[in-house]
Amino acid sequence: MLTKAKKAKIIKDAKIHDTDTGSSDVQVSLITKRIEELTKHLKKNAKDNHSRRGLLQLVADRQSHLKYLQKNHPKRYEAVIKKLDLKKKA
């Protein structure tokens, strides 16, 4: 689970302007961090199917945000992919 401090740091690193908390860039960054934490959890708890379902939903949500960025803001999309070290589909 993301604490308020972790979440604030992620938002600070990903925001586009001073009051930005909900842009796709920020959302992708937050979702990516949650995916990383859930992945660690599932390595320890392999039979936790409820968390696995949540993980799949987060991955789909992140994919939707990335698709939006790629279609409407290609430069921001490239920056997010590079910053978060996500691989593009070939």
Image (cartoon, rainbow, N blue to C red):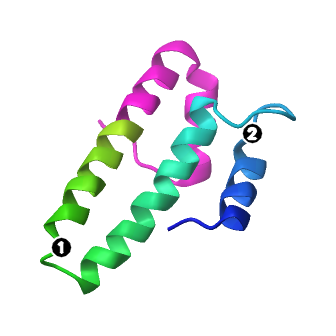
Residue at the extreme bottom: 44
Residue type beneath disc 1? Asp
The x, y position of residue 66, in whole percent, is 45, 32
Q: Contact, CB < 8 Å: mark 2 with mark 1?
A: no
Residue at the extreme right: 18
Q: Which residues are magenta?
A: 63-90
The x, y position of residue 61, in whole percent, is 36, 37
In the figure, residue 43 lies in which quadrant?
bottom left
Mark 1 lies on residue: 48
User: For the stretch drawn in magenta, what is the main secondary structure?
Assistant: helix
Seen at 46% across and 21% down, the residue is: 68
Q: Is residue 43 above or below residue 65?
A: below
Q: Is residue 63 above or below residue 41?
A: above
Q: Residues within 10 Å of mark 1 (few under 14, many from 20)?
A: few
* Dot placed on the residue nearer the N-terminal end, 2 or 1: 2
- SS of the residue under disc 1: loop
Residue 65 falls within the magenta-colored stretch: yes
Q: Nearer the viewer, residue 27 or 51?
A: 51
Mark 2 lies on residue: 15
In the figure, residue 35 lies in which quadrant?
bottom left
